[in-house]
Image (cartoon, rainbow, N blue to C red):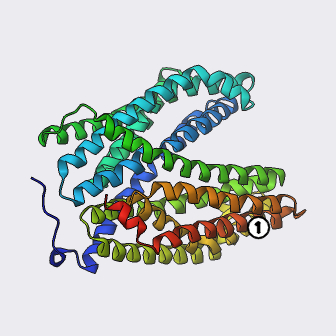
Amino acid sequence: MPTPAPTPATLPSPAGRRREILRLAVPAFGALIAEPMFLLADSAIVGHLGVAQLAGVGLASAVLHTAVGLMVFLAYSTTPAVARAIGNGQLPKALAAGRDGVWLALLLGLVLAAAGSFAAEPLLELMGARDEVRTFAVDYLRWSMPGLVAMLLIFAGTGVLRGLQDTRTPLVVAAAGFTLNIVLNLVLVYGLQLSVAGSAIGTSIAQWAMALVYVLTVRRKARTHGVSLRPDWRGVRALTRVGSWLMLRTLSLRIGILATVVVVTAQGPVNLAAHQLAMTVFTLLAFALDALAIAAQALIGKELGAARPAAARELTGTMIRWGLGFGVFTGILMAVAAPWAGLLFTSDAEVRAALTLALWALAAGQPIAGYVFVLDGVLIGAGDAKYLAIAGVVNLAFYLPLLLAVRFSGVDGGAGLLWLWAAFSLGYMLARALTLGLRARTDRWMVLGAH
């Protein structure tokens, strides 16, 4: 029988709600950094083989992670679906939604892996890979294809557990997978002399070990509660509809980032190097904000599933304050550290000077970023995917003219990079804040999330 939703008297106190946010957000942050750590480990191990090998892995990884990045909707669509069912006291329905997400991940993974295996060589040639670099890039990409299926299963499995209000298990799985990845890569690359193919094979094996943990966990929970393991194709189609909107949202974000790289490339190698370093810092800070967003997805979905819109509104306010507070804190730290941060990355004085200006612009935009990331998670948790996709296109339409203005302003050197980062961390983020904030002020997203 469905478990009845808690009465208002049993709802968590503000202190209890804060503990709940931290209980989900802190482990989520650890799990989020696992995939970049995989890439760093691969790069460190392959880097000692030679420049051509490292360049090949870098190029292949860019292709792989672009494809994988577009599939993150498998987690973002599964989490709220499971969380809403949990909030409504319908654990079997939650597990059925999770099972359908896993099946969707498996089907998409098989299609993408097959396409990637056949298209690897022409795609990498199109990107400019030549000679030895092309050979190593093709080897790495093709041997990564089995792992691509596992990566999508990990997305879906992680989404199921987040919806079940469990972010601790994904952290443990990610830590174990990262350790296994390093051991396998060292053995295969250096022990068996398999070069970059060994790195891809080791990573794929580690990813499959992680995926199997998730699949077996979902299978065990489903059987315990009498849920069939066979997919409900209506449920799969429902996740696909939500996922297609979330994919459009993600695509708009990636186009914005890619367009930024195109503009900074025209500013010269110094600004391009400094931009890469600034984007690394931005990505690290984004992981912490994404952890809050993941907590928002799980908790908002649960509250709306329990038909508690007032609690969802109060929870949203709490997390917005947390996001803004984190943004102010990190912004101040970044502004103070900016003149010296470059010493950690490079000995080139010109790159350090340009990086300082970029980090000041990044620091100014951190409070806006905190607001944006939290509201993004809130609306994903509410299942408001269509609005997020449309808003993403609108935001991109606002941002691209800003980039064109920077591109043809005639401003170069560090000032050019400063204007570019102002356009990104202030202009683009402000557009996102406005579109998300206007939606959050209404009740429409809560009505969607209750169904």
Name the residue tied to disc 1.
418
Q: Amino acid at mark 1?
A: Leu
Instruction: Compare residues 152 and 242 and report the one nearer the observer.
Output: 242
Using the image, determine if residue 399 lies above or below residue 100.
Answer: below
Instruction: Compare residues 97 and 201 and report the one nearer the observer.
Output: 97
Q: Residues within 10 Å of mark 1 (few under 14, many from 20)?
A: many
User: Residue at 65% across / 64% down in the picture?
Assistant: 428
User: Residue at 73% across / 58% down in the picture?
Assistant: 400
**Side of 180 where 89 appears, left or right:** left
Using the image, determine if residue 122 lies above or below residue 349.
Answer: above
Could you say which quadrant of the image residue 241 lies in? top left
Q: Where does the image place residue 402, in percent across and percent down from the top left? A: 76, 63
Q: Where does the image place residue 73, in percent across and percent down from the top left? A: 45, 46
Q: Is residue 18 visible?
A: no
User: Residue at 50% across / 49% down in the picture?
Assistant: 245
Give SS at disc 1.
Answer: helix
Report how many numbered discs are placed on residues in the image: 1
Using the image, determine if residue 290 lies above or below residue 217.
Answer: below
Q: Quadrant of the C terminus?
A: bottom left
Instruction: Compare residues 50 and 1 and report the one nearer the observer.
Output: 1
Could you say which quadrant of the image residue 397 lies in? bottom right
User: Residue at 49% across / 69% down in the picture?
Assistant: 439
